[in-house]
Image: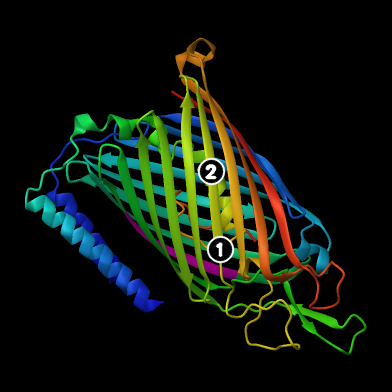
Amino acid sequence: MKAKYRLAVLIFTGGLLNLSGCAQLSIEPWVKPYERQNLADPIMQTNRHPIANMHVAHVYEARESSRGSEGTGGGGCGCN
Amino acid sequence: MKELVFVCMFLYLCACSTSQAAVLEADRADVLYHSYDGGGMKIDGPAVLLRKKATESFALSAYYYVDTISSASVDVLSTASPYTEERHEIQLGIEYLHNKTVMAFSVRQSDEDDYLAKSLNFNVSHDTFGDLTNLSLGFAFSDNDIKRNGDVLFQEQSQQFRIRAGINQILTKNLSINLDFEGVADEGYLNNPYRTVRYLDASIPSGVGYQSEVYPNTRNSFTTKLSASYYLPYRAAIFLHYRYFTDSWQIDASDIELSYRHPIAKSVELEFKIRYYQQTQASFYSDLFSHQDAQNFMARDKELSDFDDLTIGFGVTYLIPPKYSISDWRSEVSLQWDHITFNYNNFRDPTAEGGVGEEPLYGFSADVIRAFVSVYF
């Protein structure tokens, strides 16, 4: 468990360093702002219905052991 | 120490980026009715979510949620009587935008007869690399008071700490991916105070005895989630999520979800979803222990058993024409329905015939409904 956690932290930190390095090496962002209309379309929003997503996360967290990374910024089920 | 590394990295990235203002999310109000019906449990109630920008840099949000629970689940029927209860949850949040950085702080309280949870939550996210990349960090702390109805002397506590980090990356003009990590540490009383384990007991006519569950006082878990969103050429969207979970109770779990969103004309959006989840059992779980006090830690909570579930979901959103909207605010009505099937691989139904330890494996299905109205103002 600890080893997996440390590995994940290392990978993530390495990723951040790499990104930061890219910015400093002036690698240009390859998708220009004017090319992002598809990504900005409301149908592409994963959190298009936040109140529904919060309920979905609550339904699963109360019935499954898995918790975390629900994408709703929550802090636990708060129930028994 | 690890948290410090994350914070330093984040601040460094903030300093590296050029400044071009981002914007806070739009003002909106949502009113929802939710319902869950399955496995002898019926839960329903309302929820309200409101967010409003006070200025271009500050936004406030409020969330109120009610669960009205009527339970006659298999856990309850085997050792207790059906019950009803209510849970009220309230969250208040504030967001602050500075250039490309959004900081969000929220407080939350969840209150029911026998459980009071209070949480603090802080998230910060930052756009960088020409806004192709978004980095986020979050922390949460919860303090829980646990009681047991009918036992005024019973009072326990637990705490939960969460730390999360994520990166969202635009890869092409149609594809973005998201990678999230979250570590959760619990300490304190982690049992459900009503649940029992069962064990073989030849000294009583039924052949089976019951005693309270005993859980460890700590639990640490780590979750990794990879998501992808893809825009299809005919204006539709497809989403894929994969999440892997592991914890110190030896539970390994993973879930995968595929969803598809398809607009019809300008006023209707359809959404289809399929999700599969599976987990292994906790190291101290058993459906039937060999004798009383068989282990230091014992559980027969079906949520800690080896099981899988499958969700099939459908949703429809209707964009209300402007002439029917209040003050020309964009408004939508949505209906979502999920059907979830749970299959337990080592949790038997003690209310069924078949002899102790030979009962059929338990399983059930549930229907989850959400009906809500969203107004953007």
Image x and y of residue A58, in percent: 57, 51
Magenta: main secondary structure: strand
All told, the count of numbered labels is 2
- B174 shown above or below B235: below
User: Looking at the image, do the residues carrying marks 1 and 2 touch, with CB atoms under 8 Å apart?
Assistant: no
Q: Which residue is mark 1?
A: B278
Residue located at (47% from left, 31% from top): B262
Q: Residue at x 22, y 43 (%)?
A: B132
Question: What label does residue B323 carry, if any?
Answer: none
> Toward which corner of the image does residue B307 lie, by quadrant?
bottom right
Which type of secondary structure does the marked residue at label 2 adopt?
strand
* Label 1 to label 2: alpha-carbon separation: 17 Å
Q: Position of residue B42 (x, y in %)?
A: 74, 48
Q: In the image, what residue type sits under mark 1? A: Gln
Q: Is residue A46 visible?
A: no
Q: Is residue B212 visible?
A: yes
Given the current orientation, which residue lies at the most extreme front position? B233
Q: Is residue B40 left or right of residue B300?
A: right
Say whether disc 1 or disc 2 marks the residue closer to the N-terminus: 2
In the foreground, A69 or B375: A69
Q: Which residue is mark 2?
A: B273
Magenta residues, start to end: B157-166
Q: Which subunit holds the residue at mark 2?
A: B
Please, what is the three-letter code of the amino acid marked with disc 2? Lys
Q: Is residue B161 magenta?
A: yes
Whether residue A69 appears in magenta in the rendering, the answer is no
Give neighbour class at mark 2: few <14, some 14-19, many 20+ (Cα, 10 Å).
Answer: some
The secondary structure type at the circle numbered 1 is: strand
Is residue B342 shown above or below B284?
A: above
